[in-house]
Image (cartoon, helix red, strand yellow):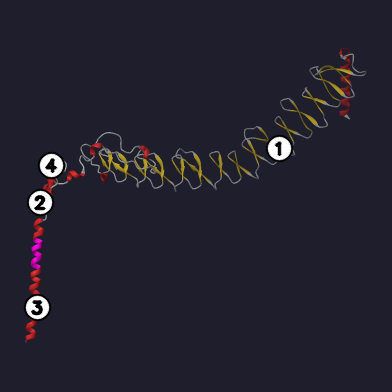
Amino acid sequence: MKQKMIKTLALIFAVVTAQVFAQDCNPACNSGDLCCNSQYGLVCYGPDLYTCHVLPNNSSIICNAGDLTCNNEYCYNPSFFSCVTLPSGQQISCNVGDSVCDTFCYNPVLHSCMTTASGQKQLCNKGDQICGEDCYNPQFQNCQSNATCNDGNIICNDECYNPEYHSCLTSDSGTQMICNAGDNICGNLCYNSQYHSCMVSASGAKLLCNAGDSICGDLCYNSLYHSCMITASGAMLLCNAGDSVCGDFCYNPSAGDICGSSMPTTGAPSVPPTLAPSTATPVPSTRPATLAPTSSPTSLVPTALGTTNSPQTTQSDSILAQGVASETPAATVSLSGENLARSEASRAVFFFGVVIAIISLLAM
């Protein structure tokens, strides 16, 4: 009854207002039309189809008959919509039965208005809960430290992880890291002990090496291919396996390398730091050109053996030749022949004596 009275008063007010402006409308308007100084300008309208609403600022708005105005700027059908006033004083049009969450309309059957950790309004699905600033479904998710994770996951440094496949480890810097399940921490890196190992270098830093490797200074190495040597200056030097050290350099004695006065005493180590990791191809040790043999092996043939076309004989060749000549077994060979003849004669005498003894026994 009250709503009908309001509509009647509004219609009367509109008619009065329209009559005020009737003389300004187009003379071609239909008989019985009224005039409205609307949002479209001066227009004629039939009061049985339209309504001219006068706004608080004395302007007018024309709407369909039965419609109302909201926020003094648009029309709405009260059969389907409602005009809701927000705390700010602004009006918004919502569906009939809707509620308001902050500045949004929502259907309370399908959604709910939640308050976040910072005090803001958040529109969530019906049955959801708030985790920090977000909505989550407790049937499939969980809330940990204001972070939403899938059901069964836990939190590590504000990140969700599945403990079936990952683990949360604390690095040397104190931060938490998500690693593969079964991994360990080396400094600030995750590693699998099946394939890698965590070693401490000479400087105290942690290095991630291949499993089974060792440390030489600040480098990882595989003892199958390399060895860690101590130089003359007391530094650690990575050499090829089987190498030795001459001063501050690696050398390979099995390859004919000689450590002598001609060996350089300054310079970079023969194996650069790029040899780590240990799976790298072994690098040959540094061998100065001055260490190569100065003559071919034929120069070692002694002249005493009767060689006429040998290269120029050195002093060491002469000494070697004398040694070989002095050890010639000529006398030994002749003595060995004489001893053989004597042995054969003794054997004949022995058998002859045995025959004589047998004949004497038969004669008796």
How far is mark 3 from mark 4, CA to CA? 63 Å
How far is mark 4 from mark 2, CA to CA? 17 Å
Q: Which residue is mark 2?
A: 326
- Say if the magenta span includes residue 341: yes
Left/right placement of residue 272 relative to residue 136 reads left
Left/right placement of residue 49 relative to residue 342 reads right
| Foreground tag (3 vs 4) | 3
- In the rendering, at what x and y percent does residue 159 appear? 55, 39
Q: Nearer the viewer, residue 306 or 114?
A: 306
Q: Please, what is the three-letter code of the amino acid marked with disc 1?
A: Ser
Q: Please, what is the three-letter code of the amino acid marked with disc 2?
A: Ser
Q: Residue at x 7, y 77 (%)?
A: 353
Q: Please, what is the three-letter code of the amino acid marked with disc 3?
A: Val
Residue 315: mark: 4
Q: Nearer the viewer, residue 39 or 133?
A: 39
- Labels 2 and 3: the sequence-earlier one: 2
Q: Please, what is the three-letter code of the amino acid marked with disc 4?
A: Gln
- In the rendering, at what x and y percent does residue 227 appear? 32, 44
How far is mark 2 from mark 3, CA to CA? 46 Å
Q: Which residue is mark 1?
A: 112
Which quadrant of the rendered structure holds the N terminus?
top right
Q: Which residue is mark 3?
A: 354
| Mark 1 surroundings within 10 Å by alpha-carbon count, few (fewer than 14), some (14 through 19), many (20 or more) | some
